[in-house]
């Protein structure tokens, strides 16, 4: 499926940083996109959208980067793809991912790895994952914007590592009909682009209720979200100087692993917002510490269930000649799954099946669900806006109802997107699975709570750039998170960072 010639040079990115991928690595990088672009896309990039290959398209194969769906073409378009086409966007290509979206570096794909155009000492960096193909596609300007999916950070991490914008909307705002499930209580469709305005434009097109997606937010909840937006507008207008934002700075995100460059860029971003009149508020989200482990119990548990259908009977590509397999004493489904799934997917299926088993469930799955609730509660305690999913709303009261300035909550929370700059792909190879899961430490909390979150690229200062050795990375990802349903609020604040 890697139809791009392996030796073809990556187009230089149109950012100011040089692409210095060395040749041997370049040949490895056959799979930024998996399928040939449609003929129109090379001439018309104005409204081209690349689609991550776990989103169904009827004119390109949809393989989820897995041998288990090798050669599969969906008879229908996912709702998001249909909406894009109806609004005159061109689907340019399908993009590479970690198999079934499980990964943080786009290195575990049945089509081969995707590399970042950036490098350190000549070694390509990780493009982040699992939507790494989509992020490289927009960074290099081959497509105008791209859809990715974000279960625990897969749109935001590649955006941070490549210096593009990556937005994960609130859970349920964008339809997932036609999106191949990884973790159904966490999966969202996200958008990547070089400019915020492009990302919010695509968001405006793909958002909306969809009766075919049972997790799509109902009209009633959407109305409540609109009402909450009104409250937010009034609240901000009332504050002195009008339009002043209260920005939450969570203490628990100040971890020792935070790289000095990420820390200084983050602080500079906060100071910039403060210098134009917004206020910073230290907040505590004590359950953050449990988020990563809760996520890595829940996501594999859901995956083990969602991937059970790929048995070679209902779904899944059977081994070409099952009888000639040395393990032909195994049932068809075991042969199909054994050969069809890659290592990481198998690891997660086994892990998930174990944590759901009767002996382990109480210690792992149930504990992780409790951890998830605590993470959600932490967020509801600090946001000024009520969570529209809670009835009656649980939050700091709106001062309209009390007559005083009691709205102590924050409007948004700003954090780094990832604790470090991207590792090289050699470093990734040396990482244990658990070390690689660490990359998601700042992105999974918003996923567990279903919150809208965006990663914005913030350029390094000259001083900071000087400190970088032999690396052409020029930005750090800064993440803005908002209360559930406050997608507009998050996009507004992102525009102040752009
Ligand atoms: N890296 C995380 C995982 O492997 C997140 C993936 C995603 O958001 N699809 O599960």
Image (cartoon, rainbow, N blue to C red):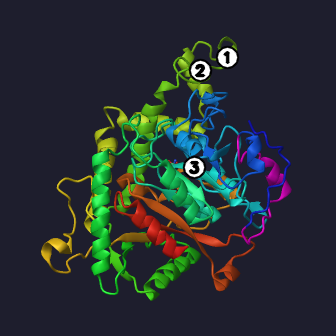
- Residue lying at 30% horizontally and 86% vertically, measured from the top left: 240
238 with respect to 158 (left or right): left
**Secondary element type, mark 1:** loop
Look at discs 2 and 3 and give the one toward the viewer.
Answer: 3
Q: Where on the picture, by quarter, is residue 345? A: top right
Quadrant in the picture for the C terminus: bottom right
- Residue lying at 80% horizontally and 64% vertically, measured from the top left: 20
Task: Report the Cα–Cα distance between label 2 and label 3.
Answer: 33 Å
Sequence-wise, the earlier of marks 2 and 3 is 3
Q: Check contact, mark 3 vs mark 1: CB within 8 A.
A: no
Quadrant in the picture for the N terminus: top right
Q: Mark 3 Cα within 10 Å, few/some/many (few <14, many 20+)? A: many
Q: Which mark is residue 147?
A: 3
82 with respect to 351 (left or right): right
Query: In the rendered structure, which segment of residues is drawn in magenta?
Result: 15-34
Is 21 magenta? The answer is: yes
- Residue lying at 29% horizontally and 50% vertically, measured from the top left: 221
Please state the horizontal and vertical placement of residue 235, each as a whole percent of the image. Answer: 28, 74
**Secondary element type, mark 2:** helix
Task: Report the Cα–Cα distance between label 3 and label 1.
Answer: 38 Å
Sequence-wise, the earlier of marks 2 and 1 is 1
State the residue position of label 2: 335
Please state the horizontal and vertical placement of residue 392, each as a whole percent of the image. Answer: 17, 55
State the residue position of label 1: 325
10 with respect to 69 (left or right): right
Q: Check contact, mark 2 vs mark 3: CB within 8 A.
A: no
């Amino acid at each position: 499926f890697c139809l791009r010639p392996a030796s073809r040079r990556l187009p230089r990115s149109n950012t100011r940083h040089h692409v210095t991928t060395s040749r041997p690595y370049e040949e490895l990088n056959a799979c930024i996109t998996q399928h040939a672009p449609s003929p129109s896309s090379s001439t018309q990039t104005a409204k081209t959208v690349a689609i991550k290959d776990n989103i169904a398209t009827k004119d390109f194969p949809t393989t989820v980067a897995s041998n288990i769906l090798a050669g599969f073409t969906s008879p229908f378009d996912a709702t998001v793809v249909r909406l894009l086409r109806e609004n005159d966007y061109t689907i340019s290509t399908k993009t590479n991912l970690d198999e079934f979206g499980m990964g943080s570096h786009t290195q575990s794909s049945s089509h081969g790895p995707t590399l970042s155009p950036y490098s350190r000492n000549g070694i390509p960096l990780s493009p982040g994952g699992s939507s790494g193909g989509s992020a490289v596609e927009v960074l290099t300007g081959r497509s105008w914007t791209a859809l990715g999916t974000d279960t625990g950070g897969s749109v935001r991490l590649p955006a941070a590592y490549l210096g593009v914008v990556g937005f994960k909307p609130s859970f349920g705002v964008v339809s997932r009909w036609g999106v191949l499930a990884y973790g159904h209580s966490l999966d969202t469709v996200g958008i990547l682009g070089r400019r915020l305005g492009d990302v919010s434009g695509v968001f405006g097109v793909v958002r909306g209720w969809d009766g075919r997606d049972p997790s799509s937010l109902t009209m009633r909840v959407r109305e409540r979200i609109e009402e909450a937006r009104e409250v937010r507008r009034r609240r901000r207008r009332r504050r002195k100087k009008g339009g002043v934002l209260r920005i939450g700075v969570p203490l628990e995100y100040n971890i020792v692993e935070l790289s000095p460059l990420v820390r200084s860029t983050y602080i500079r971003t906060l100071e910039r917002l403060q210098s134009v009149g917004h206020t910073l508020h230290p907040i505590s989200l004590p359950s953050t510490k449990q988020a990563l482990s809760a996520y890595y119990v829940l996501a594999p548990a859901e995956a083990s269930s969602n991937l059970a259908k790929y048995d070679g009977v209902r779904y899944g590509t059977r081994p070409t000649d099952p009888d000639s397999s040395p393990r032909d004493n195994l049932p068809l489904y075991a042969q199909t799954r054994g050969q069809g799934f890659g290592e990481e997917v198998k690891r997660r299926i086994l892990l998930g099946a174990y944590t759901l088993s009767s002996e382990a469930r109480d210690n792992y799955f149930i504990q992780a669900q409790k951890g998830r609730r605590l993470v959600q509660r932490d967020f509801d305690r600090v946001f000024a806006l009520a969570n529209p999913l809670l009835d009656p709303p649980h939050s700091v009261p709106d001062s309209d109802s009390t007559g005083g300035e009691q709205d102590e909550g924050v409007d948004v929370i700003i954090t780094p997107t990832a604790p470090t700059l991207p590792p090289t792909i050699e470093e990734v190879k040396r990482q244990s699975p658990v070390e690689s899961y660490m990359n998601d430490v700042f992105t999974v909390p918003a996923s567990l709570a279903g919150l809208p979150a965006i990663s914005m690229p913030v350029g390094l200062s000259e001083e900071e750039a000087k400190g970088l050795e032999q690396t052409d990375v020029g930005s750090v990802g800064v993440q803005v998170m908002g209360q559930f349903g406050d997608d507009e609020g998050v996009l507004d604040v992102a525009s102040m960072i752009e």
